[in-house]
Amino acid sequence: MTATHVPGLPVIDDGWLISTNPATGEEAGRVPVADEKAVIAAVERAKEAAVWWQGLGFDGRKTRLLRWRTLIVQRIEELAELVHRESGKPLADGTIEAVAAVEHLDWAARHAKKVLGPRRVRTRILVAEHSGHLEYQPYGVVGVIGPWNYPIVTPVGPISGALAAGNTIVFKPSEYTPVTGQWLADTFAEVVPEHPVLQAVHGLGDVGGALCRAGVNKVAFTGSTATAKKVMAACAENLVPVVLEAGGKDALIVDADADVTAAAEAAVWGAMTNAGQTCIGIERVYAVEGVYDRFVEAVVAKAGKLRTGEEIGPITMPRQLDIIRDHIEDALAKGGRAVLGGAGAVQAPFVSPTVLVDVPEDSSEIREETFGPTLTITKVRDADEAVRKANDTPYGLGGSVFGKKNAIRIARRLRSGMVAVNGTLTFVGMGNLPFGGVGESGFGRIHGEDGLREFARAKAITVRRGPSLLPAMTFERTPAQVQQIVKALRLLYGRKP
């Protein structure tokens, strides 16, 4: 690396991807770069390993996944320190991220058999002589493309679900956090040394593209909406199905009967944790006019206590600093006011907490994903107006509502995949709840039962259990038998409900 190297910016040198701390520029580690042939080779190895991994059955996979869970718990400080060195996020944030990853890994391992295992289903009149059976079979090899903002918990979500379902994994971590990704693959290999069930391949965007085209059976991607569209296009060449978790512009609604103090604390956490680099982070607040002034005051007081370099870490991806600066400047130029932070908040590699009010709806700070420790607060007449404004976005990932009487009803009206009531981001901590968005935030789900089914194909099987008393699906049927079938149908379903 040269003396002019930008801290945190990935560098490829002599076949190695070098990862550096965005705050200090210190090297966090280096991993070998994979070319297209290496990616294809990894997928081929994964295909062979899949035969063994699937053959273990749900119980065998559960045992090994729980061993991996235990190893992560035993070395959680090591993992948190690694992600701190590589992404700059505070140690406490790295630790909590690892805790959430353990939750999802544990849940997937323990529940895969119940959710995906073979079961008998009730027969229907047209083929009453047959029994119905349903089972879920793994795809084979799943490609996982991970993000840099949460390099532990985010990829572990699809990885744990796909592994529990019986797939093997080829994992392409973000080029900004490759060492953390390699740690996950290496520790898994410690508890499952027999075959390359979880492999990591490294490089820039071209490696992700190569993975999409390398013969994987499904791809799980987390990242920006723009990149999600490129991944989907690459996978479409071979009809490879995808699950995409893309950007967000999540809103928090503060209703008239909300606990203002609790709402302010949650808004600051939802907006500022991980320096605002959170896909489900709160970027907009719509507060009903009766509580607006008190809420703004409380948010400014709480956010003003946060210190850059301590609670607020650096911006991991250097070019994101320009986006954050542009959004703040656009909001101010269009008439918005900074009640905390403002035009001078961006001091690379840090951004000070910034709270903006009176920001017009056409501002980029309202319309586009900022991904920094900024928050806009907008006064609204009532919850109905708040819902309209919150839903006025192409994104639809998460959201939050604070209130008492109508909070759950308001939550149901938000166009999003997840909502926290009287909290923020809490749904990501529950391994039994699905996670994913709508619209420009992507589609498909990870986590929970839906996340397990995302990585397995439903397979229907019928088995004859006796002779056909009223044969329907055969050329041997008679007109009289057809009439008997219609008569039976009318007895069962002919009455008005």
Image: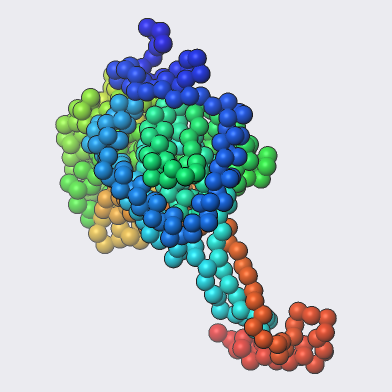
Q: Who is closer to the viewer here, 119 or 387? A: 119
Q: Who is closer to the viewer here, 238 or 375? A: 238
Q: Is residue 104 visible?
A: no
Q: Residue at x 24, y 33 (%)?
A: 91
- Number of marks in the rendered image: 0
In this rendering, would 173 be left or right of 141? left
Q: Is residue 398 visible?
A: yes
Image: 254 above or below 28: below
Q: Who is closer to the viewer here, 270 or 239? A: 239
* Quadrant that contains the N terminus: top left
Q: Residue at x 16, y 35 (%)?
A: 301
Place of residue 457 in the rendered image (x, y in percent of width and height, measured from the top left)? 58, 58
Snapshot quadrant of residue 350: top left
Image: 3 above or below 69: above
Q: Determine the residue located farthest toward the top in the rendered image.
A: 3
* Quadrant that contains the C terminus: bottom right
In this rendering, would 443 be left or right of 269? right
Figure coloring: rainbow
Q: Residue at x 55, y 42 (%)?
A: 46
Place of residue 43 in the rendered image (x, y in percent of width and height, measured from the top left)? 58, 39
Place of residue 40 in the rendered image (x, y in percent of width and height, measured from the top left)? 61, 34
Image: 199 above or below 351: below
In this rendering, would 60 be left or right of 136? left
Place of residue 2 in the rendered image (x, y in percent of width and height, measured from the top left)? 41, 8
Q: Residue at x 17, y 46 (%)?
A: 261
